[in-house]
Image (cartoon, coloured by chain):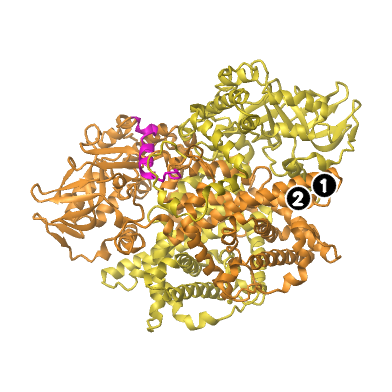
Chain colours: A orange, B yellow
Amino acid sequence: MDAAAEVDHLAAERDAALFDVEEMKVAWAGSRHAVEVGDRMARLVASDPVFRKDNRTMLSRKDLFKDTLRKAAHAWKRIVEPRLTEEEAGMLRLYGMFVPAIKGQGTEEQQKKWLPMAYKFQIIGCYAQTELGHGSNVQGLETTATFDPKTDEFVIHSPTLTSSKWWPGGLGKASTHAVVYARLITEGKDYGIHGFIVQLRSLEDHSPLPGVTLGDIGGKFGSGAYNSMDNGVLLIDHDHKKIPRDQMLMRLSQVTREGKYVDSDVPKQLLYGTMVFVRQTIVRHPKQFGSQDGGPETKVLDYKTQQSRLFPLLASAYAFRFVGDWLKWLYMDVTQKLVAKDYSTLQETHACTAGLKAVTTSATADAIEECRKLCGGHGYLNSCGLPELFAVYVPACTYEGDNIVLLLQVARILMKTVSQLASGKQPVGTMAYMGNVQYLMQCKCAVNTAEDWLNPVAIQEAFEARALRMAVNCAQNIGQAASQEEGFYERSPDLLEAAVAHIQLIIVTKNNSRTFAMFMPLHSSQAPGRLPGNWVHHTKQGALANEQLGKLYAQVRPNAVALVDAFNYTDHYLGSVLGRYDGNVYPALYEEAWKDPLNETVVPEGYHEYLRPLLKQQLKVSRL
Amino acid sequence: MDAAAEVDHLAAERDAALFDVEEMKVAWAGSRHAVEVGDRMARLVASDPVFRKDNRTMLSRKDLFKDTLRKAAHAWKRIVEPRLTEEEAGMLRLYGMFVPAIKGQGTEEQQKKWLPMAYKFQIIGCYAQTELGHGSNVQGLETTATFDPKTDEFVIHSPTLTSSKWWPGGLGKASTHAVVYARLITEGKDYGIHGFIVQLRSLEDHSPLPGVTLGDIGGKFGSGAYNSMDNGVLLIDHDHKKIPRDQMLMRLSQVTREGKYVDSDVPKQLLYGTMVFVRQTIVRHPKQFGSQDGGPETKVLDYKTQQSRLFPLLASAYAFRFVGDWLKWLYMDVTQKLVAKDYSTLQETHACTAGLKAVTTSATADAIEECRKLCGGHGYLNSCGLPELFAVYVPACTYEGDNIVLLLQVARILMKTVSQLASGKQPVGTMAYMGNVQYLMQCKCAVNTAEDWLNPVAIQEAFEARALRMAVNCAQNIGQAASQEEGFYERSPDLLEAAVAHIQLIIVTKNNSRTFAMFMPLHSSQAPGRLPGNWVHHTKQGALANEQLGKLYAQVRPNAVALVDAFNYTDHYLGSVLGRYDGNVYPALYEEAWKDPLNETVVPEGYHEYLRPLLKQQLKVSRL
């Protein structure tokens, strides 16, 4: 709430509310006390110019990060000021995962040694688990920690490029230490993933210690967002990086002076905080990542969950591409007709162009974002190209006619067509199926086997019945309203869906080319499962559609890369390290990272001004 | 395709393809010729350093725009070079909407005068239709063009802040002219929206002409994307801005020397290109925007289409907030139990934390993006805050366990529970409902009226029947596979859905607090419509759920703003000119625009280097 606000344009809205907002604030925050503390801290942050964030999207990457260091140093000053209560100070404090990891997995002795330094920011720690080639698959991490009984040390090593630690927040520029997760190897045996406290940078001048390569992984989605963070990359050279044995987190298991691996008798369940517990469980279910026979990791494309999300999008791309040819023909045809003063197909052409624009742009924007998510963490990096592709594409949903507005126009034409059916007027073109109203309103799905769903006649009937029934249902409901306009307004959400169903039918039926006959069913099989009510007359037919879909995924699988090759986009055009033609993504990701402006210097701008005084406990605390 | 690529990591994938990629490229591009021309131009663009774009996300706003001017000037050089065919040159040419508007709506004389200048870039034009307060509602545009018979001129005027032209690409910094859409007023009568060619900037020094205020509207979604464009704002002061009568686009209607408005006899349908035709149709259906009685524009929140997209998100926010309280309780409870060596609820707690994390973060990320789209064009501006909110939030779907991976863990626990049902083991806690398998597998929905959907018992049974049937179905299918693991892999897409259904049930049932009893049905009514198969035993019950949903929207409507107020977020925290507490969005949008670095100078950087030589036809064309 802006104290300076002079007018409240929403006052009438607030007066109309039928409940007590203050009470709801309490319910939302959990208690009256929480509301009050929250309000106090919000005012404090909002009134402090150092905490401004309205310029975030205009700062360069370097300035964004420097601003983060400034804010962190400033927050620390406020925390140690006597004017805040412990509870209030806690709201400004953020340690990330370094502290919880030591708390959960460190012995009492280790906690006593490391936590006070972390609390006081004498050291800055990060949580280095994820690797360039291994995200969710913790079991697949490659970094090793090999015990050397001669020196009583662990040798920490990144044996491959894909074993680089990649993503940890604070790793790129700010952290002095990390909890590094690595495969513990002692007496020649691999004991799986354990945590090790590793110093990364000099506490004197912040330079990376010998054997340690550190950098920022580059720009990320959004113009501000996580670009204020130094998500980092870390490569450890085994010739140099040795740590004392007591820097292995030893609450759950220990390595003795002699190199024996010993499990502690502490019940493991007790030691895990929620998030660590979640990770632990991932570790315990490795099968979803490794292959059954201990071979290489499963290719991402081989996961059925990826196929079920990605292949329908691929099929849609083809369907949209070829319905576009038909639309072009329709447009040329209507232009010729208009010259001959034949306006008969004008309205239908409008419905098709408006509706196809709306359905295809919305689906494509969603598909780009879905593809981005399917890339896991890397999809969030600008270098993968998808964040920019989304930002460039998504305005298409709004410009040249907002998609909702366009679909309502299609719905209006559908309602008009339905209302004329009674008078015996036969609809033509893409609306011709509506003339078949008697049959389509009562027909039942004839599918008996999964293969029946490959029959274009069955699919077309499914889409026709769905579209027509939705349209007729809307028309009936509108007919019961006080007026046409009132009814149209009240039923507009249903009308949108009816319009989409009609347009989807067009996409399916205008895609008859043999060229991609194999992909059409894949695209169209999506819909029957979502068919409403009594056309699919028992669950079995939905299950059959699903079954057939699974078989189609398997058919598409060997063709997936080639189907994308056929788009014929160049690497330059795509601008994506993940979409590279040669598929050699990891070196490309790695190389791209170093181009980020934050990597121009090893020690970041702002170190001397903000970070060093924080680490050296030399921040000037303002006095009251 | 990178010519320099040395390894092809996807070679095996390509060998596995079962169709001819080269043939598919031809099908995709439309012809072999199209493939060849496309390849040639792609090589040309990729090999030309001026067209590089890999640095887009790292450039400042100013540099991004300057780079656009450089590219435009360079493209023009390539276009006029003799080494490109006309077809190839056409692929580098982009005129936007200025040329099509004059082609479609200008008289032959007007076309003869203006088009050659536009083709040669002696003038740069943009299409100025959208206004700050009026996007899709073309009928609501406020800019006026009043004919003055004394001087034979039109007076162009922006009477209000909301009448500022807002969004046109190229308007902010580059354009010298615009087709401005304005209400034509002559002889005291308003004849609706017409197009007028208006000069904006001096052709000598590019300074804005008297009476014209011009600027860029500020940063946009994405770190590069549309930030290379100068989407602009234009305010026209009536004291200064007069244009000759012949700069009204007069193909469809004219104003005579005396000020008479005359419709031409040209059939209007003939004159509109697809997009313009779409717009024209929007103009013809003004009712969806204006109120019936000619009162003020309908509030966006009053559209049912907005309500049906926004209110379920609002209900979800409350549902997620309060299920969080329950989860906190569950966590504390399990911690206490663990201390007492009672591990009975550990597995269930894991399923709840993992599943709720996955379902709530995915839904919230989607909701933020949905809200952004519901803001129309303004949602694309950084100043509205939603682009950054999305970019900041969406990583939650990936970090701390990818959502897909987490849901598969939930599914694994569900499958285990189902398999134990046969042995008579009664599930407990959030899985207790699965013990009711006999009833839930065969029960029928008891809803007879729309109001029945308000009954928590009916809703809970709907969610329970759905979740259980999906889980049992998965278990049966897995049971038919060669092995458990094989079956789990094959059925993983279905398992994901079953896990989501189970988690949604938890969200519904753990939200019993009276505080928000009014919103729970709204949230949960979404699901019955999507219930599969034979639980909802005829379409009628789906329609009743839909009907009840509409009634709930109406109940939520007066409370909508107050429900958001209760979140108690400050303007500083939200950082959104659209989410302001006082709702006074237009002055805020306008004010924010001027803070963009591009607005530091009136004439943009790059004018002298790229724009002026282009306009003055003085670009040095490289000779062969």
Which quadrant of the figure contains the C terminus of chain A? top left
Q: Are marks 1 and 2 in contact (CB under 8 Å)?
A: no
- Residue A292's spot in the image, x, y percent? 32, 64
Badge 2 element? helix
- Residue B288's spot in the image, x, y percent? 75, 51
Q: Which residues are magenta?
A: A578-600
Numbered mark located on residue A329 in the image: none
Between A35 and B374, the residue placed more toward the observer is: B374
- Amino acid bearing label 1: Lys
Badge 1 element? helix
Residue drawn where x is 34% and y is 71% of the image: B345
- Whether the magenta-drawn stretch holds residue A583 is answered as yes
Q: Which residue is mark 1?
A: A337
- Residue B150's spot in the image, x, y percent? 88, 22
Q: Is residue A168 above or below residue A187?
A: above
Which quadrant of the figure contains the N terminus of chain A? top right
Q: Residues within 10 Å of mark 1 (few under 14, many from 20)?
A: some
- Amino acid bearing label 2: Thr
Q: Which residue is mark 2?
A: A349
Left or right, B371 with reference to A73:
right
